[in-house]
Amino acid sequence: MKGTSNIEKIIEAATEWREESFASRNQAIEDTLAAPNRWTEQALDHALDRWMHRLTLDAVQDWVGEGSNGSAESVTVGVVHGDDGPFAGFRDAIAVWALGLDYVGAVPESSPAILPAFGTSVRAAGVDGDIQFASADAVVQQADVLIAGPRSDDEMDVPGACDEQSIEESHRLIRSPLYSVGVVDGHESEDEMERFAEDMLLFEGAGRRRLALLWAPVDHSPDAYLEAMARFRGLFPAHEDTPGTLQMQQAFLEARDEPHAYAEGLEFLVSRGDPSPQRSGHVRWSEYDGFEDVEEWRSDQSDDVYAVIARHHLHDQLPSHWPLRTPGGVHVPPLNDEEGRTTMQFLQQVRAGR
């Protein structure tokens, strides 16, 4: 099939990685669990399965479009991957590899193994373009083009580093922290509530697109959603450090007599209050009289919100300009969502020399 060679090679690697017995996959998960983070084996396995099944020939080809092989001139794309999730920037790497551009990436200390190991498989499949990994400083020095995600403990001034290396602004794609919000109306099925729980809890409440805030009707009980979160924790147990990280937040809420609820072992925490995102693992429950309350708030926060999560049959009642998604996929987004399209357009323009 014309123009699909790089894509087919990526799919070849992804097909290998779909096998739970694949040695490189297992070693990458083991190395990630040994790194300084709060990811769990169950969460990594689940998300890795979903990412690898997301990489189908049709999906990647539709995202990339025509002309996925080779480049008119050598272009090195640097990607400084964020540290807010084990797969931060994974889609960016796939985009670079699919276009056959040279890639140099900097992975964070918290997730040092999965992307390099998958990159080795893609390289072994024969994809066009070089694939290397280096420190963040070295990435900026080597890059003609830079994509950067947020890092919580990185002292690098990315725009300043780009200026020093003469990477012009049109050749930079620098992302800021985001989060997602949910809107419920009390008619969610048990399955939908459990998918909401996945969006809230999969990576211990972390991740750049994490579901941090739930909007619900005034006086609607959160009990069914708390039960769904508890069921999710039965399948995906919390990291051993999670209760400790939530303890101070729970004590603060207790001291202020603010309404909140939590699992018996403090594997998650939900508080009722103003619509402001809390720390990882702490979900805010805010109330609305009507959807106009949510719209008024969202219009002021739109630059910070990745998606609005709601059950499918509620979408027709919500403003069409909202970035609507259904529950259960916030950590493994479609390749060609708005952010994915922006990434591909950015790289295609650079590749064409514009």
Image (cartoon, rainbow, N blue to C red):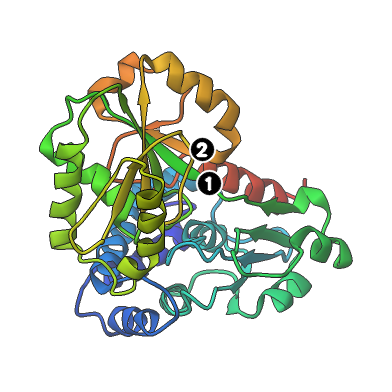
Please rate how many residues cluster around mark 2, counting C-alpha atoms within 10 Å: few if below 14, some from 14 to 19, many from 20: some
Q: Position of residue 102 (x, y in %)?
A: 64, 69
Quarter occupied by residue 114: bottom left
- From the image, tell me which residue sits under label 1: 178
Q: If the image is split into quadrants, where does the C terminus sit? A: top right
Query: Could you tell me which residue is drawn at 41 percent across and 37 percent down?
Result: 181
- From the image, tell me which residue sits under label 2: 305
For residue 47, which numbered disc appears in the image?
none
Residue type highlighted by circle 1: Leu
Q: Position of residue 76 (x, y in %)?
A: 70, 67
Which sits in the foreground, 42 or 340?
42
Q: Is mark 1 on a helix, strand or loop?
A: loop
Left or right of residue 37: residue 143: right
Per the model, the C-alpha gap separating discs 1 and 2 is 6 Å
Left or right of residue 352: residue 339: left
Q: Position of residue 332 (x, y in %)?
A: 36, 52
Please rate how many residues cluster around mark 1, counting C-alpha atoms within 10 Å: few if below 14, some from 14 to 19, many from 20: some
Q: Which badge, 1 or 2, comes first in the chain's sequence? A: 1
Query: Could you tell me which residue is drawn at 34 percent across and 61 percent down?
Result: 204
Which sits in the foreground, 27 or 76?
27
Q: What element carries label 2?
A: strand
Residue 241 seen in this snapshot: yes
Which sits in the foreground, 282 or 130?
282
Quarter occupied by residue 121: bottom left
Q: CB under 8 Å between callouts 1 and 2?
A: yes
Q: Where is residue 326 in the image (x, y as percent from the top left)?
A: 30, 35
Q: Can you say whether 99 is above or below 241 in the image?
A: above
Q: Can you say whether 227 is above or below 160 in the image?
A: above
Residue type highlighted by circle 2: Val
Query: Could you tell me which residue is drawn at 42 percent across and 57 percent down?
Result: 280
Residue 332 seen in this snapshot: no
